[in-house]
Amino acid sequence: MLKIRVKGRHLVFFAGICVVAAVILYTALPGMLYRAAEASADEVKAEKIYSLLIDWFPSSDEAAKALYFSAEKAVHNVSAGGAPGMVYFFNGSTGMGGIPGTETDLAEAVERLEAIRERFPESPWSRHALEKLGAACYMLGRIDKAIDYLRVSIEETGMGAVESTRLLIKIYLEQGEYAKALQLADRSLAEKPGFNPLDIMLLRGRALIGMQEWDKARQVFRELPGEAEKIYGNMPGGEKKESVSLNVSDYEKKARGYLSKIDRLEKSGGLTGTVAGKVLMGGKPVSGAHVFLIDRDVDEDYYTGYTGDLREIITGETGEYRFGDLAPGDYALGVGVQISTVEGYTLESSPDDGLTIGAGEIRVWDINFVPTVKLLLPEAGTAVDEQVTFSWTPAQGAVCYELFIGPVVRDEKGNISTNYTTVLKSGITQNRVTVNIREEHQKLRFGGGIAYHEKIDPESVLGLLRPGGEYTWGIYAYDAAGRRISDSSGVTFYHSKKEIPLFRVKGSISEGDRLLLEERHEDAVKAYEKQIKKNPGDSHALTVLARLYQYGITWGKSDPEKAAVYYEQLLQAENTPEARSALAQVCFDAGQLEKAQSLFKSLKGTSEESWLTYYNLGRISFLQGKPAEALELMEQALEMQHGIYVRAFPVSLALVLNRTQQALSFAERVDEGDRYLELLRRYVDKGYQVNPEAAAAITAGDYRLAHSLLSPENQHDLFVKELLGYLKGYGRLKEPRSISGINDPLLAGLLEKMLGVRVSVRSD
């Protein structure tokens, strides 16, 4: 047996080496772990490493950073108004906030950030934590604590905490503490002039409005566009001219909106209005709901999920909200609630799209969530062939329903990655309806919205209820007044797409379909062309090719002449109203007005006769030099089902014909008319008229002469020129347009809100 003798001093030396190695390892390990967390693309794995750092090395600088970054995720995007687990409801849109999670996650983030302040008071991460603590407490409705943290954040950083400053001013404004908001904004602009100056200027102007300092507020908003141009035009590296113009235009629009608000407030003697109410879920108050106020003059560019610029109130136990100090004008409301709270419920639609608040008026407006409609048949995963019966439980108070469906697309793992829906059947008076799959597909292959990703979406080309397709479906419920009172979706699409109702249409697809669904668009075109060579009457291949050329494989690359060729071939195979309607549209797009007119007229008395038929006939009549006839056709279109979607065309047409009262009547009825109705009323009150010579030329259909009679030096003449341009075809352009030269805020605002153009303007 081998014996090894080790001297005591050797053992001591070896033990010393081990201790030194352990110390070095212990010292180096936090950095190694933190770098591993930073490098990890797996958030769950990174979070586990952060937890190890916090538990094993609680005094290390890496533990402070781990506490901060593990908490930051829950507070991320607070300046945009996002909140963990929140789903937002605005008029016409619903969507998730930018962050997954729950309010519990946010509360835990507060605990971690407070731990940094307690355990690492001298660390720079302690100062960083203050800004996040203020934001998190604000999101949780702990307003007093939020103010305390934000104040300390500002002082400890010497006004260097940009978002703390911005959020604290916003809170002061929401609480009506206008003097405090103004003082902080002035301090920021004086001490940190390069820190977010445009947003601070906006907040400063709002504070001055609240203090009824009208002239000072006007000065702020008159200077704002010029400051925006300086900043965006002199950014390091420079920006493209178009990008500068768009950014500056956004501030110009806001400035004009606030200037208009100041005018209305001054006219009312500073008398303001109020909107108040409750958020109710099944008749019970909802606490912790975020209620947002959209001012139609200044908040037109908000979108669901980005709510940082909107006035906001978080409801308490009574579910109440209240927005005061409102200038007379048009407003709308939005609401955000925890998705766990709203499951099984849906927002009851408002009777109209917004609220008009008068001077001194108090409007009471409850935001009601009602139970969703429960779907019964078809059962999930059902494969259907010739027909399918849809059924659901009746909704309380409903007199009719709409059935909507939409295609489902799955990713490589089989998860539902995208979907959209469209109404399939309207006016259903029972709680069930049977649909003939083949008949509906024949109709729907020509209609429905066209979607693009990088290229045109295959499902939108092939049409709904195609063989081999997978679909989701649901129900909208309406009361006797035609108001949507419930639906079947709730928040399902935004929470767990695995739970959405699905059915599949039996049948096989062609080689062209397969290639198109694989998004090999050019190869699909070749395959469809081969099918037509073999069978010139292949209606499916002809339809798909016609639609691909009608809309373009890529956005803006349509070829209506080539589309017309394929639709002509299709008509030889099957002369249906749907095919004639599609051909009429491409003929119109190709400028073949007489042929398009004949085809549209042939739709009268058929299943394809609709508001769109008369809308297109009206547009053709205008282009043929018959504006009065065009106006009559627009009136017919508006009286038909869904005729409100004529939108701004008849309003614009009535204005260029000097029929201002008729323009007002149209604006009160058409879709999106509420966006510019108040501006139009002011336009009419001011007595604007097209000059007599130009008006006579327009009435006679001589638009070229009218254009020459409109002076480029006259603001109203420039306005009329833009309306004529829109009526003659600008409305069909694929890209948004920008125009300049109109300095009248009223005329510029009308153009922007009616026609969607961007107007570059300075307020003197």
Image (cartoon, rainbow, N blue to C red):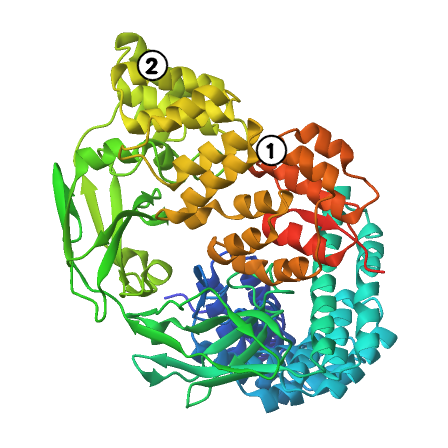
Residue at left 48%, top 26%? Answer: 588
How many numbered marks, from 0 up? 2
Instruction: Tell me where residue 148 sits by quadrant.
Output: bottom right
* Amino acid marked by disc 2: Gln
| Contact between labelled residues 2 and 1, with CB atoms less than 8 Å apart | no
Q: Nearer the viewer, residue 335 or 68?
A: 335
Q: Earlier in the sequence, mark 1 or mark 2?
A: 2
Q: Nearer the viewer, residue 756 or 650?
A: 650
Residue 468, given in percent of the width and then of the height, sits at: 22, 35
Nearer to us of marks 1 and 2 is 1
Instruction: Tell me where residue 301 sits by quadrant.
Output: bottom right
Which disc is residue 92 wearing?
Answer: none
Residue named by callout 1: 728
Tell me: 764 left or right of 95: right
Q: Secondary structure at mark 1?
A: loop
Q: Nearer the viewer, residue 684 or 239?
A: 684
Instruction: Tell me where residue 580 sits by quadrant.
Output: top left
Q: Residues within 10 Å of mark 1 (few under 14, many from 20)?
A: some
Q: Nearer the viewer, residue 112 or 668?
A: 668
Tell me: 18 left or right of 166: left
CA distance for labels 1 and 2: 30 Å
* Amino acid marked by disc 1: Lys
Query: Which residue is outermost to the right?
Result: 190
Residue named by callout 2: 569
* Above or below 223: residue 605: above
* Above or below 226: residue 286: below
Whether residue 71 is visible: yes
